[in-house]
Amino acid sequence: MKLNKQTFRYKNKILIEKAIFTPPYRHERAVQNEGCFVYVQGTKTKIYSSDDNLKIENKEAILLKCDTYFFDFIQESENQSVEVIAVHLYPEILRKIYINELPAIIDKQVSNKKTKHIADQKIISKFIESLEFYFENPSLVNDDLLELKIKELVLLLVQTKNVASILELVANLYSPRVANLKNVIELHLYANLSIEELAKLCHLSVSSFKREFKKQFNDSPANYINTKKIEKAKGLLSFSKLPISEVAFESGFNDPQYFTRLFKKKEGMPPSEFQARQVI
């Protein structure tokens, strides 16, 4: 549940925003024709996209490329609140800010593979602290200040360990992406994502997704995915003494009761009985 939201606009576009809410909470975000720097504090977060299945820890930042994302903000305690700060990196605004050329430091090309995680937490936390000051004093914010904050973020990203160069960054942020359905399914096979959400990650309508899935796997999405999840569950039940609820979650089922019903339907016995028959 969202509790509060603040935004700073630049040329009629939301440039920087902060949201505070209570977990557990799933948020869908379509990042189109822009990049987005996202900082989360207050909980761990699972992030799914067409080619990402990752987790960021409390007080970590990531850099999103053009894609559709699902964020699962995890509840770790009662009365918990989560704060998310997002900075949108629009190509047209970057071009305006850097009207002549990008900073000289950016011209240094390196071959490291770019990662979404932003490595230097100390540098980023100081930047976030400066934004918090302006969220507390919004009357001080104007277009000139927002331009300076974008320049500051770009220069900080250049100096973090995991971002190879801003030229590579810009090139990758704004290039359109074509999702491979088979890769998406393999990546998120055991994630608790619905057919509708998987279709969005593939940039397809649900009907088109189902048709393409049938071509690729010669099966319906629900039956194929559930069969794979049950296979994983059988492995966990055979070689561990995990509680049934934990086996369900590890296999991609959010509802242990549904998992038990499906397992019994497919295997002819409940998972507890299957586990009891195994020799550990």
Image (tube, helix red, strand yellow):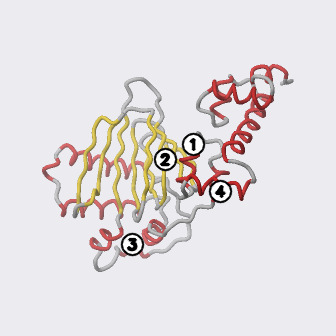
Q: Earlier in the sequence, mark 1 or mark 2?
A: 2
Up the image or down, 251 lies above or below 168; here it is: above
Label 4's element? helix
Give the number of the mark in front: 4 or 3: 4
The residues tagged by marks 4 and 2 sit, at their Cα atoms, a distance apart of 23 Å
Does 33 sit left or right of 241 as displayed? left
- The quarter of the picture where the C terminus appears is top right
Q: Quadrant of the N terminus?
A: top left
Where does residue 94 sit, x and y in percent of width and height?
Answer: 32, 69
Q: Which residue is mark 1?
A: 193
Which residue, given by chain and number where applicable, does mark 4 sit on? Answer: 211
Residue type at tag 3: Ile
> Which tag, 3 or 1, sits closer to the chain's start?
3
Work out whether mark 4 precedes mark 2 in sequence or the reverse, and give the earlier one.
2
Q: Amino acid at mark 4?
A: Arg
The residue identified by callout 2 is 70
Q: CA distance from mark 3 to mark 1?
A: 41 Å
Confirm or deny contact between disc 1 and disc 2 (CB under 8 A).
yes
Three-letter code for the amino acid on which mark 2 is drawn = Phe
